[in-house]
Image (cartoon, grey):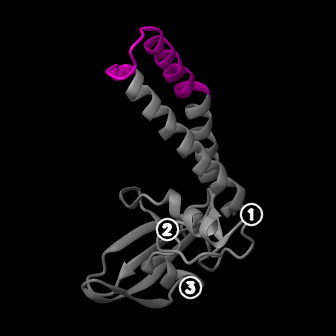
Amino acid sequence: MSDDDEAEDTPPGLPPGTPFYMTPTGAAALREEIRALWEDERPRVVEVVSWAASLGDRSENADYQYGKRRLRQIDGRVRFLRKRLERVQVVDPTAQARRDQVFFGATVTYARVSDDAEVTIRIVGVDEAVAERGDIAWVAPVARALLGARVGDVRRYRTPAGTEEVEVVAIAYGMDPPR
């Protein structure tokens, strides 16, 4: 793989060569997306393109043109996902032996020192992060600050508004409740 290929396959904000971690659930979601695109959507689009092509003049045939464009999009996304899965390092949080510290896959409850508000997040892979759900990428500032912490540890990290201090309240892995 050339440096250009690796840079293209690296999630935004990560330097080339950075490990590409993902939970088993996240890797399964990528595999399911590939399956849905390749086995469900692509055959339907191929049918429409074939039908549209049979009508004759393709230059002004919107179904044909849109279908061909959609096939290129599907093929590009499938290629991207397959490359991603080739590089992924699946980390199963339920297999974490050291459950007293924050590592990839941990569900962490922390209290903001400024207002004592408690927040619970799960540290996941870059492609799995959905802030509204509390799934934060392991490279996000708060996640990076929390990595390696134990219950009671106070950590600082930078935000656009300045420095934030948080205290780890609970750590859980997999199906364990936060403790």
**Amino acid of disc 2:** Ala
* Residue that lies at the very extreme toward the top in this rendered image: 55
Which of the pair 27/80 is nearer the observer?
80
The magenta segment: 39-63
Residue 156: horizontal and vertical position, in percent?
A: 41, 91
As drawn, the label of residue 95 is 1
Identity of the residue drawn at 42% across and 10% down: 56
Whether residue 72 is situated above or below residue 109 in the rendered picture: above
As drawn, the label of residue 45 is none
- Measure how far apart labels 3 and 2 are at the Cα level: 16 Å
Identity of the residue drawn at 63% across and 68% down: 6
User: What residue is disc 3 on?
Assistant: 149
Q: Quadrant of residue 157?
A: bottom left
Residue 16: horizontal and vertical position, in percent?
A: 60, 75
Seen in the image, is 23 located left or right of residue 146? right
Dot 1: element: helix
Figure quadrant of the C terminus: bottom right
Number of residues whose C-alpha sits closer than 10 Å to that of mark 2, classed few (under 14), some (14–19) or many (20 or more)? many
Residues marked 1 and 3 touching at CB (< 8 Å): no
Of marks 1 and 3, which one's residue comes earlier in the chain?
1
Residue 15: horizontal and vertical position, in percent?
A: 56, 78
Q: Is residue 58 magenta?
A: yes
Of marks 1 and 2, which one's residue comes earlier in the chain?
1
Dot 2: element: strand
As drawn, the label of residue 137 is 2
**Amino acid of disc 1:** Ala
**Amino acid of disc 3:** Ala
Whether residue 88 is situated above or below residue 25 in the rendered picture: below
